[in-house]
Image (cartoon, rainbow, N blue to C red):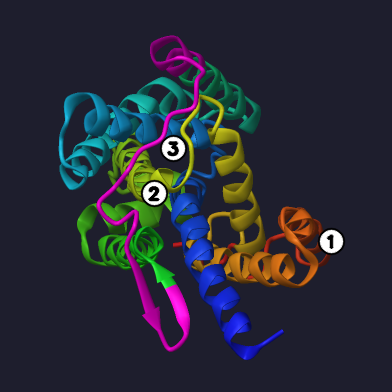
Amino acid sequence: MSADLVLQLIANGVSVGLGYALAAVGLALLFGILEQVNFAHGELYMLAAFVVWWLVQMVGLPYPAAAALAIAAMACAGVLFARVALVPTLDRSADAAILATLAVSVILQNAVRLVFGATPHSMSTPLEGMTLLVGGVLLFGQRLLVAGAAVVAFLGLTLFLRLTSIGQAMRAMAQNKRACVMVGIDVRRITGWTAAISAALTGFAAATIAPLFDLYPSMGGDVVFKSFAVVIIGGMGNIAGAAVAGVALGIAEALVGGYLGSAFKDGIAFAAMILVLLVRPHGLFGRAVRV
Protein backbone atom coordinates (compact mmCIF):
# COMPACT_ATOMS: atom_id res chain seq x y z
CA MET A 1 0.00 0.00 0.00
CA SER A 2 1.46 3.33 -1.11
CA ALA A 3 2.11 6.25 1.20
CA ASP A 4 -0.40 8.38 -0.72
CA LEU A 5 -3.12 5.80 -0.13
CA VAL A 6 -2.32 5.61 3.58
CA LEU A 7 -2.50 9.42 3.83
CA GLN A 8 -5.81 9.34 1.96
CA LEU A 9 -7.20 6.74 4.37
CA ILE A 10 -6.04 8.77 7.38
CA ALA A 11 -7.59 11.95 5.95
CA ASN A 12 -10.86 10.10 5.34
CA GLY A 13 -10.69 8.67 8.86
CA VAL A 14 -10.13 12.07 10.47
CA SER A 15 -13.11 13.59 8.63
CA VAL A 16 -15.37 10.64 9.46
CA GLY A 17 -14.12 10.58 13.05
CA LEU A 18 -14.83 14.27 13.54
CA GLY A 19 -18.33 13.52 12.30
CA TYR A 20 -18.65 10.78 14.92
CA ALA A 21 -17.45 13.19 17.59
CA LEU A 22 -19.84 15.92 16.44
CA ALA A 23 -22.77 13.49 16.51
CA ALA A 24 -21.80 12.29 20.00
CA VAL A 25 -21.07 15.61 21.73
CA GLY A 26 -24.72 16.26 22.61
CA LEU A 27 -24.99 12.82 24.20
CA ALA A 28 -21.75 13.34 26.15
CA LEU A 29 -22.87 16.77 27.36
CA LEU A 30 -26.21 15.51 28.64
CA PHE A 31 -24.65 12.65 30.58
CA GLY A 32 -21.79 14.80 31.83
CA ILE A 33 -24.14 17.39 33.35
CA LEU A 34 -27.20 15.38 34.34
CA GLU A 35 -25.84 11.81 34.50
CA GLN A 36 -28.86 10.73 32.45
CA VAL A 37 -28.48 8.50 29.39
CA ASN A 38 -30.51 9.81 26.45
CA PHE A 39 -31.81 6.92 24.35
CA ALA A 40 -33.68 9.41 22.16
CA HIS A 41 -30.41 10.92 20.93
CA GLY A 42 -30.56 9.15 17.57
CA GLU A 43 -34.17 10.17 17.01
CA LEU A 44 -33.38 13.82 17.80
CA TYR A 45 -30.64 13.60 15.16
CA MET A 46 -33.11 12.04 12.72
CA LEU A 47 -35.72 14.71 13.44
CA ALA A 48 -33.20 17.49 12.78
CA ALA A 49 -32.15 15.85 9.51
CA PHE A 50 -35.76 15.70 8.32
CA VAL A 51 -36.34 19.33 9.34
CA VAL A 52 -33.37 20.40 7.20
CA TRP A 53 -34.57 18.21 4.30
CA TRP A 54 -38.11 19.64 4.51
CA LEU A 55 -36.88 23.23 4.59
CA VAL A 56 -34.55 22.68 1.62
CA GLN A 57 -36.60 20.38 -0.59
CA MET A 58 -40.18 21.37 0.22
CA VAL A 59 -39.96 24.99 1.37
CA GLY A 60 -37.10 25.90 -0.97
CA LEU A 61 -34.83 27.64 1.53
CA PRO A 62 -31.08 27.82 0.87
CA TYR A 63 -29.13 25.14 2.70
CA PRO A 64 -27.37 27.51 5.17
CA ALA A 65 -30.68 29.13 6.17
CA ALA A 66 -32.35 25.74 6.53
CA ALA A 67 -29.49 24.48 8.71
CA ALA A 68 -29.66 27.55 10.97
CA LEU A 69 -33.44 27.27 11.38
CA ALA A 70 -33.16 23.54 12.10
CA ILE A 71 -30.59 24.16 14.85
CA ALA A 72 -32.84 26.81 16.42
CA ALA A 73 -35.84 24.48 16.17
CA MET A 74 -33.87 21.68 17.84
CA ALA A 75 -32.91 23.98 20.72
CA CYS A 76 -36.64 24.59 21.31
CA ALA A 77 -37.29 20.86 20.98
CA GLY A 78 -34.59 20.28 23.60
CA VAL A 79 -36.42 22.50 26.08
CA LEU A 80 -39.63 20.53 25.48
CA PHE A 81 -37.70 17.26 25.77
CA ALA A 82 -36.34 18.38 29.14
CA ARG A 83 -39.81 19.20 30.44
CA VAL A 84 -41.28 15.90 29.26
CA ALA A 85 -38.50 13.38 29.95
CA LEU A 86 -35.59 14.83 31.91
CA VAL A 87 -36.90 17.13 34.63
CA PRO A 88 -39.55 14.65 35.88
CA THR A 89 -36.87 11.97 36.29
CA LEU A 90 -34.14 14.10 37.92
CA ASP A 91 -34.75 12.70 41.39
CA ARG A 92 -35.70 9.21 40.30
CA SER A 93 -33.70 6.11 39.48
CA ALA A 94 -31.75 5.71 36.24
CA ASP A 95 -34.44 3.29 35.02
CA ALA A 96 -37.01 6.08 34.97
CA ALA A 97 -34.85 8.28 32.74
CA ILE A 98 -34.08 5.36 30.43
CA LEU A 99 -37.77 4.51 30.01
CA ALA A 100 -38.73 8.15 29.50
CA THR A 101 -36.13 8.76 26.78
CA LEU A 102 -36.96 5.42 25.12
CA ALA A 103 -40.60 6.46 25.00
CA VAL A 104 -39.65 9.75 23.34
CA SER A 105 -37.51 7.88 20.78
CA VAL A 106 -40.40 5.58 19.83
CA ILE A 107 -42.82 8.53 19.54
CA LEU A 108 -40.46 10.59 17.39
CA GLN A 109 -39.59 7.74 15.04
CA ASN A 110 -43.20 6.82 14.41
CA ALA A 111 -44.29 10.45 14.10
CA VAL A 112 -41.69 11.08 11.38
CA ARG A 113 -42.70 7.84 9.64
CA LEU A 114 -46.34 8.98 9.71
CA VAL A 115 -45.56 12.45 8.34
CA PHE A 116 -42.79 11.73 5.81
CA GLY A 117 -43.28 8.01 5.10
CA ALA A 118 -40.75 5.21 5.23
CA THR A 119 -39.24 5.85 1.80
CA PRO A 120 -35.61 7.07 2.03
CA HIS A 121 -35.00 10.69 1.03
CA SER A 122 -31.84 12.41 -0.14
CA MET A 123 -30.69 16.00 0.13
CA SER A 124 -28.20 17.94 -1.97
CA THR A 125 -26.00 20.78 -0.75
CA PRO A 126 -23.80 23.37 -2.51
CA LEU A 127 -20.67 21.53 -1.33
CA GLU A 128 -21.80 18.12 -2.54
CA GLY A 129 -19.67 18.04 -5.69
CA MET A 130 -16.73 20.10 -4.44
CA THR A 131 -13.35 18.41 -4.08
CA LEU A 132 -9.94 19.73 -3.11
CA LEU A 133 -6.59 18.10 -3.84
CA VAL A 134 -3.93 18.84 -1.20
CA GLY A 135 -0.57 17.11 -1.41
CA GLY A 136 -2.00 14.11 -3.22
CA VAL A 137 -4.87 13.76 -0.73
CA LEU A 138 -8.39 14.25 -2.04
CA LEU A 139 -10.70 16.18 0.31
CA PHE A 140 -14.46 16.39 -0.17
CA GLY A 141 -16.42 19.58 0.38
CA GLN A 142 -19.20 18.29 2.63
CA ARG A 143 -16.71 16.26 4.69
CA LEU A 144 -14.63 19.41 5.18
CA LEU A 145 -17.78 21.16 6.38
CA VAL A 146 -18.40 18.37 8.90
CA ALA A 147 -14.81 18.60 10.17
CA GLY A 148 -15.02 22.37 10.49
CA ALA A 149 -18.40 22.12 12.22
CA ALA A 150 -16.96 19.66 14.75
CA VAL A 151 -14.07 21.99 15.60
CA VAL A 152 -16.43 24.97 15.94
CA ALA A 153 -18.86 22.97 18.10
CA PHE A 154 -16.21 21.74 20.52
CA LEU A 155 -14.47 25.12 20.83
CA GLY A 156 -17.76 26.95 21.20
CA LEU A 157 -19.05 24.52 23.80
CA THR A 158 -15.80 24.71 25.79
CA LEU A 159 -15.89 28.51 25.83
CA PHE A 160 -19.57 28.54 26.76
CA LEU A 161 -19.06 26.17 29.68
CA ARG A 162 -16.10 28.12 31.04
CA LEU A 163 -16.96 31.75 30.35
CA THR A 164 -20.72 32.11 30.82
CA SER A 165 -22.77 32.03 34.03
CA ILE A 166 -25.06 29.33 32.60
CA GLY A 167 -22.05 27.26 31.60
CA GLN A 168 -20.52 27.59 35.05
CA ALA A 169 -23.83 26.53 36.62
CA MET A 170 -23.89 23.51 34.31
CA ARG A 171 -20.38 22.59 35.43
CA ALA A 172 -21.44 22.96 39.04
CA MET A 173 -24.35 20.59 38.43
CA ALA A 174 -21.96 18.08 36.94
CA GLN A 175 -20.03 18.11 40.20
CA ASN A 176 -22.82 18.13 42.80
CA LYS A 177 -26.54 18.67 42.20
CA ARG A 178 -27.41 18.90 45.90
CA ALA A 179 -24.82 21.60 46.51
CA CYS A 180 -26.29 23.56 43.58
CA VAL A 181 -29.70 23.52 45.25
CA MET A 182 -28.17 24.71 48.52
CA VAL A 183 -26.52 27.74 46.89
CA GLY A 184 -29.65 28.71 44.95
CA ILE A 185 -28.98 27.31 41.47
CA ASP A 186 -32.26 26.39 39.75
CA VAL A 187 -31.57 22.77 38.79
CA ARG A 188 -34.66 22.51 36.60
CA ARG A 189 -33.70 25.63 34.64
CA ILE A 190 -30.16 24.38 34.11
CA THR A 191 -31.56 21.02 33.00
CA GLY A 192 -33.57 22.86 30.34
CA TRP A 193 -30.47 24.77 29.20
CA THR A 194 -28.46 21.56 29.05
CA ALA A 195 -31.10 19.77 26.99
CA ALA A 196 -31.48 22.76 24.65
CA ILE A 197 -27.74 22.99 23.99
CA SER A 198 -27.46 19.21 23.61
CA ALA A 199 -30.32 19.15 21.09
CA ALA A 200 -28.92 22.17 19.22
CA LEU A 201 -25.54 20.43 18.91
CA THR A 202 -27.33 17.32 17.67
CA GLY A 203 -29.14 19.48 15.13
CA PHE A 204 -25.82 21.02 14.08
CA ALA A 205 -24.45 17.51 13.53
CA ALA A 206 -27.50 16.42 11.54
CA ALA A 207 -27.47 19.53 9.36
CA THR A 208 -23.88 18.87 8.27
CA ILE A 209 -23.65 15.06 8.31
CA ALA A 210 -27.11 13.98 7.09
CA PRO A 211 -26.66 15.24 3.48
CA LEU A 212 -23.95 12.57 3.05
CA PHE A 213 -26.48 9.75 3.53
CA ASP A 214 -30.09 8.77 2.84
CA LEU A 215 -32.70 9.96 5.32
CA TYR A 216 -35.24 7.49 6.76
CA PRO A 217 -37.15 7.27 10.07
CA SER A 218 -34.94 4.57 11.62
CA MET A 219 -31.64 6.23 10.69
CA GLY A 220 -31.14 7.28 14.31
CA GLY A 221 -30.23 3.71 15.29
CA ASP A 222 -26.95 3.86 13.37
CA VAL A 223 -26.16 7.29 14.77
CA VAL A 224 -26.89 6.42 18.39
CA PHE A 225 -24.75 3.27 18.22
CA LYS A 226 -21.67 5.16 16.99
CA SER A 227 -22.39 7.96 19.45
CA PHE A 228 -22.56 5.54 22.38
CA ALA A 229 -19.37 3.87 21.15
CA VAL A 230 -17.54 7.21 21.06
CA VAL A 231 -18.85 8.27 24.49
CA ILE A 232 -18.03 4.93 26.11
CA ILE A 233 -14.53 4.81 24.62
CA GLY A 234 -13.74 8.41 25.56
CA GLY A 235 -15.40 8.22 28.98
CA MET A 236 -19.08 8.68 29.79
CA GLY A 237 -19.73 12.41 29.94
CA ASN A 238 -16.16 13.38 29.02
CA ILE A 239 -16.54 15.86 26.16
CA ALA A 240 -12.85 16.11 25.27
CA GLY A 241 -12.62 12.33 25.49
CA ALA A 242 -15.50 12.02 23.01
CA ALA A 243 -13.64 14.23 20.53
CA VAL A 244 -10.44 12.17 20.75
CA ALA A 245 -12.33 8.86 20.69
CA GLY A 246 -14.34 9.92 17.62
CA VAL A 247 -11.24 10.79 15.60
CA ALA A 248 -9.42 7.63 16.74
CA LEU A 249 -12.40 5.45 15.82
CA GLY A 250 -12.70 7.10 12.40
CA ILE A 251 -9.01 6.57 11.60
CA ALA A 252 -9.13 2.96 12.82
CA GLU A 253 -12.17 2.20 10.66
CA ALA A 254 -10.59 3.82 7.60
CA LEU A 255 -7.32 1.89 7.96
CA VAL A 256 -9.03 -1.43 8.67
CA GLY A 257 -11.39 -0.87 5.74
CA GLY A 258 -8.46 -0.03 3.47
CA TYR A 259 -6.28 -2.97 4.49
CA LEU A 260 -8.83 -5.71 5.22
CA GLY A 261 -11.96 -4.58 3.38
CA SER A 262 -15.11 -2.70 4.30
CA ALA A 263 -16.73 -5.84 5.73
CA PHE A 264 -14.43 -5.59 8.78
CA LYS A 265 -14.85 -1.86 9.30
CA ASP A 266 -18.12 -1.86 11.25
CA GLY A 267 -16.80 -4.35 13.79
CA ILE A 268 -14.14 -1.90 15.00
CA ALA A 269 -16.57 0.09 17.17
CA PHE A 270 -17.85 -3.11 18.82
CA ALA A 271 -14.35 -4.40 19.46
CA ALA A 272 -13.13 -1.06 20.81
CA MET A 273 -16.11 -0.74 23.17
CA ILE A 274 -15.65 -4.24 24.55
CA LEU A 275 -11.91 -3.75 25.00
CA VAL A 276 -12.33 -0.42 26.78
CA LEU A 277 -15.06 -1.78 29.06
CA LEU A 278 -12.81 -4.68 30.01
CA VAL A 279 -9.64 -2.66 30.58
CA ARG A 280 -10.93 0.80 31.61
CA PRO A 281 -14.65 0.64 32.47
CA HIS A 282 -14.82 4.44 32.89
CA GLY A 283 -13.35 5.04 29.42
CA LEU A 284 -9.90 5.97 28.20
CA PHE A 285 -10.08 9.41 29.83
CA GLY A 286 -12.42 8.55 32.70
CA ARG A 287 -15.15 10.76 34.12
CA ALA A 288 -13.09 12.98 36.41
CA VAL A 289 -12.73 15.76 33.83
CA ARG A 290 -16.21 15.52 32.35
CA VAL A 291 -16.80 19.20 31.62
Question: In the image, 287: left or right of 140?
Answer: right
How much space separates mark 2 and mark 3, taking CA atoms? 7 Å
Q: Is residue 81 left or right of residue 217?
A: left
Q: Nearer the viewer, residue 16 or 163?
A: 16
User: Which x, y percent locates residue 169?
Assistant: 31, 53
Q: Residue at x 31, y 39 (%)?
A: 196
Q: Is label 2 in contact with label 3 (beta carbons under 8 Å)? A: yes
* Element type at mark 2: helix
Instruction: Identify the amino acid type marked 2.
Output: Ala
Q: What's under tag 1, amino acid-wise?
A: Leu
In the rendered image, residue 52, in percent from the top left (x then y), is placed at 29, 35
Quote the CA–CA distance across marks 2 and 1: 30 Å
Q: Is residue 130 magenta?
A: yes
Identify residue type, mark 3.
Tyr
The mark found on residue 205 in the picture is 2
Which residue lies at the image location 47% right of the left edge and 58% below the top edge? 19
Residue placed under numbered mark 1 in the picture: 278
The disc, 1 or 3, on the residue closer to the chain's N-terminal end is 3
Residue range corresponding to the magenta coloring = 110-138
Q: Nearer the viewer, residue 69 or 163?
A: 69
Q: Nearer the viewer, residue 59 or 17?
A: 59
Q: Position of residue 247 (x, y in %)?
A: 55, 69
Which residue carries the number 3 mark?
A: 45
> Could one spot residue 237 in this view of the protein?
yes
C-alpha separation, residue under disc 1 versus residue under disc 3: 30 Å
Q: Are discs 1 and 3 less than 8 Å apart at CB?
A: no
